Image (cartoon, helix red, strand yellow):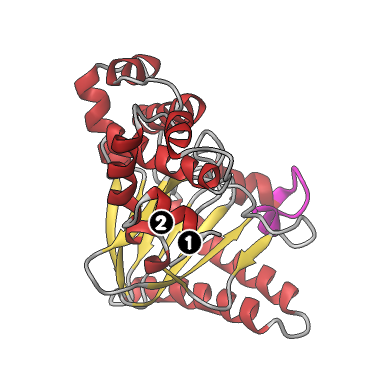
Amino acid sequence: MKYSRLKLDKTGLELGTRGSWAFPVTGSARPGRLSHYEGGRFECHFHPETEMTLIAEGEMYYQANEKVFLLREGDGIFVNSNVMHAGWLTGQSDCAYLPMNFATVMVSGHENSRIEQLYVEPVLRDNLIPFAAFFAKNEEDRPILSLMWECHRLLAEKQEGYELLVKATLCQLWFQLYMRGKGEESVCPDRGVIAVKTAIAHMEGHYAERLTLEELAEVCNFSRSEFCRIFRRYTGRTPFSYLQHLRVRRSLPLLQDRSLSITEVAERAGFAGASYYAEIFRRYMNMSPLQYRKKKE
C-alpha cells in the first residue's frame, strides 16, 4: 500500500496548503482517511493558514499543541495559524475526515482593512483562540459545525458563485469564533511549542549526522529530562522515535536510486549500519528496504 505523506519543510511547516491567492481556500470533495497514513497518523506539523476539520466517519485523536481531543463523527475542530497539530487512529477502525485550509485574507479582504484590524488580527495576533473543538452533542457548538459543513458542501459541489458563498460562510464562521474569544485573555506563545519547532528543525537539518538527546535539549535551552517530556507532550513521540521515523522517511527517495546500495542509503539517512536500518525500516513500513525498492520498480 502506498501511504500518504505530508509535505513538510525542515521546521515542520506544511507546504502547499493554501491553494492559490486567487482563491486561498483548499478542501476536498472526498474525505481523507487516517489509514492512508503510515501508522494511522499524520505527523505533528503547522502552517500559516487556519484549518478546520470535520469528522465524516469513525473517530480520531486530534492533538493541537499539547491538548488532545477525541473527535467522533459529526465533530469538528478549528486550528489557528501556525498551531502545531497531529491526528491518529483510536484503534483498529478507520477514520474519514474533511480538512479545509484557508488564508484569513478570505475574511479580512485587503491588508489593514477595518475587518482585519477589528476582527481578524485579534484572533491571529493575540492568539485568542489557538484551537477550539466543537462537538455535535453540544447544542452551543452546532451553529459553527453547521457553517463548517456548509463550507465543505460548497467546495465539493462548486456550483456557480460558490466562491462568493464560501467567503460569506467563512465570514459568518469567523464572527462566531471572534465572539467566542472576545473577552478572553491573550495566550502567550508557549515555550514548549517554540522548543519543539526548534528541535524538529534541527533534526531535519542534521538527521544524517549523529544526534544526541543532549544536543537537541541544548538547542532548545532545556534540560534533557524536561526536553523529552515537552517533546512527547506535543508530538506524541519520544525525540528518538521521531528522529528514527524521520530518517526512515528521508530514506524512501534514496531507495529508489538503484545506484545506491542499502548500506549507502542507511548511511545517508543517518543510520549506523544496514542491519539496524533494516530493523527500524521494517518497524515503520512493515517490509524490508529491499522489498520497498522492488515494490517501486
> In the picture provided, is 21 more to the left or to the right than 94?
right
Whether residue 108 appears in magenta in the rendering, the answer is yes
Residue 61 picture quarter: bottom left
Spot occupied by residue 111 in the image (x, y as percentages of width and height)? 76, 45
Q: Secondary structure at mark 1?
A: helix
- In the foreground, 1 or 68: 1
- In the foreground, 199 or 53: 199
Q: Which residue is mark 1?
A: 295
Q: Quadrant of the N terminus?
A: bottom left
* CA distance separating discs 1 and 2: 6 Å
At 37% from the left and 71% from the top, the residue drawn is: 141
Q: Which residue is mark 2?
A: 291
At 60% from the left and 49% from the top, the residue drawn is: 120
Q: Residues within 10 Å of mark 1 (few under 14, many from 20)?
A: few
Residue type (three-letter) at the residue carrying disc 2: Gln
Q: Secondary structure at mark 2?
A: helix
Residue 200 picture quarter: top left
At 75% from the left and 57% from the top, the residue drawn is: 20
Q: Which residues are magenta?
A: 103-114
> In the picture provided, is 1 more to the left or to the right than 103?
left
Residue type (three-letter) at the residue carrying disc 1: Lys
Q: Which mark is residue 20?
A: none
Mark 1 in CB contact with mark 2 (< 8 angstroms): yes
Spot occupied by residue 214 in the image (x, y as percentages of width and height)? 29, 15
Residue 172 picture quarter: bottom right
Whether residue 73 is visible, yes or no, is: yes
